[in-house]
Amino acid sequence: MATPIVQCENVRKTYQMGMVTVAALRGVSFDIHAGEYVSIMGPSGCGKSTLLNLLGCLDRPSEGHYRLGGDDVSQLDDDALSAIRGKRLGFIFQSYNLIQQLTVLENIEVPLYYQGRPEAECRAISTELASRVGLEQRLHHRPFELSGGQQQRVAIARALVNDPLVILADEPTGNLDSSSGQEILKIFANLNRNGKTLILVTHDPGIAKHCSRTIRLRDGELESDVHH
């Protein structure tokens, strides 16, 4: 069996809120293999956002181990975590997080620009990705000229630009009407068919059923882990 791409081993996360210690994650363990399409669900305050931040190397566990692509990233410093985020992870957020002054192409290019790739190469990669998500007619539009669904497609293309090991999506259809949401889910399904590993945080069971596995959290613990 291949080494899992994501390994969480007894991961705990506590926060200090004034005099009170809050346990957001209380010893969570699971593995995700390359090519899986996983939803993370649970009620508000169950630890989903905390877990997503840890999986996305935006934060570190208080205890336990997190391995990404076989490397233990649990205790890396901020600079090392930032480098891992840039190389191994793609992020898609509910609010798209696009730069309003930049065109579709320029928004997709941003992560490549930080890597110092040649301009022509950046342009070629971002043009190809824009067409993969159906935006070849919108390359020079700015975000405010696009619908919500189109903006989320830009965000998906940007998340793919570094050919990440894992794509993390946080309520990616949360701001979209149902037909735009379905379009985004079709793109995800297609990415997954082509071998991409996707982890989707959602509160919507209708979205989770598009995934092949659902991990449920409750009160910072793993309540269930179901393949479907």
Image (cartoon, helix red, strand yellow):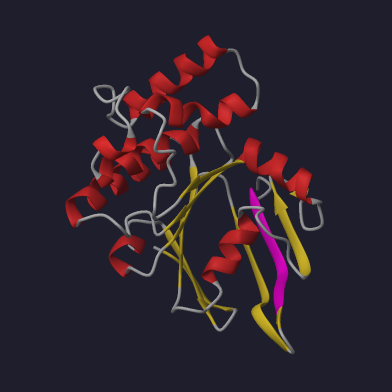
Quarter occupied by the C terminus: bottom left
Please tell me in which quadrant of the rendered image residue 144 appears.
top left
- Compared to 195, does 77 lie above or below? below
Q: Is residue 162 visible?
A: no
Which x, y percent locates residue 109?
49, 26
Residue 102 colored magenta? no
Left or right: residue 133 versus residue 162 is left
User: Which residue of the protein is positioned furthest toward the front in this rendering?
Assistant: 101
Q: Residue at x 24, y 22 (%)?
A: 137
Left or right: residue 33 versus residue 199 is right
Residue 9 colored magenta? yes
- Compared to 185, does 43 lie above or below? below
Which x, y percent locates residue 71?
77, 47
- Chief secondary structure of the magenta span? strand
In the depicted view, which residue is nearer to us: 123 or 131?
A: 123
Please tell me in which quadrant of the rendered image residue 164 appears.
top right
Which x, y percent locates residue 142?
32, 32
Highlighted magenta segment, given as a residue range: 5-15
Q: Residue at x 42, y 34 (%)?
A: 157
